[in-house]
Image (cartoon, rainbow, N blue to C red):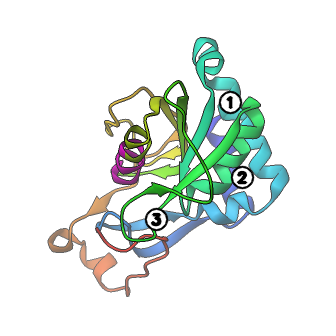
Amino acid sequence: MTENEVLSEFRASEALLEGHFLLSSGKHSGHYLQCARVLMNPDRAARLALALASALPRDLKQAITKVVSPAMGGIIFGHEMGRALGKDAVFVERPTGTFELRRGFTINPDDRILLVEDVVTTGLSSREAIAAVEAEGGKVIAAAALVDRSAGSVDLGVPFHPLISLSFPTYDDNEIPPELAAIPAIKPGSRAKA
């Protein structure tokens, strides 16, 4: 699946938004990818996951024993990646602010984990989820995402495989351009400001 085909999926589901957005990272942007909208259609979610799974290196696919995603945004795509790879998919969540396994999910010391996100911008959630997996004794051998918003600059400490990489400009509070500052900021994500 090409970048244009992936973006067409976002446009078709009205998931590529324009305006003034306050991202989970605390930065501002004129664009937002609402992955929940692109993933709300099961057939579309499956197509995107199959495209990413098929792009992963063969040796990596053979080594993966489990897929782990951070809640909330990564759950649907992580589940679809688990289906595409034929592996169990579980998630970590933050009931008290720190990622942890719940709901009877387990990670074994011999598990080789693919961490799956919907969108990676700064990598904070991914690194926190990786730490939670390692605290349970698992080994994250790679990460994957539907979208890398860092355009390849993020370092997760493991090989990272996004379906597409995009570089929409982001701004700190004191750097917001006047045309963006004139629009009220919307906080569309699922995580409180970092």
Q: Is residue 157 above or below residue 25?
A: above
**Over which residues does the magenta segment extend?**
123-131
In the image, which is nearer the foreground, mark 1 or mark 2?
1
Residue that lies at the very extreme toward the top in this rendered image: 59
What type is the residue that disc 2 sits on?
Glu
For marks 1 and 2, the one nearer the N-term is 2
Label 3 vs label 2: CA separation? 16 Å
Tell me the SS state at disc 2.
helix
For marks 3 and 1, the one nearer the N-term is 3
Q: Position of residue 50 (x, y in %)?
A: 75, 35
Label 1 vs label 2: CA separation? 17 Å
What type is the residue that disc 3 sits on?
His
**Other residues around mark 3 within 10 Å, as few (<14) / some (14–19) / many (≥20):** some
For image coordinates 40% across by 42% down, the residue present is 130
Q: Quadrant of the N terminus?
A: top right
Q: Position of residue 95 (x, y in %)?
A: 45, 70
Q: Quadrant of residue 175?
A: bottom left
Q: Position of residue 55 (x, y in %)?
A: 64, 24
Disc 3: which residue: 31
Q: Is residue 37 above or below residue 76?
A: below
For image coordinates 39% across by 38% down, the residue present is 134
Is residue 187 or residue 1 the one in the foreground? 187
For marks 3 and 2, the one nearer the N-term is 2
Is residue 142 or residue 131 the one in the foreground? 131
Pointers 3 and 1 in contact (CB under 8 A)?
no
Q: Position of residue 118 (x, y in %)?
A: 56, 51
Disc 2: which residue: 9
Label 3 vs label 1: CA separation? 26 Å
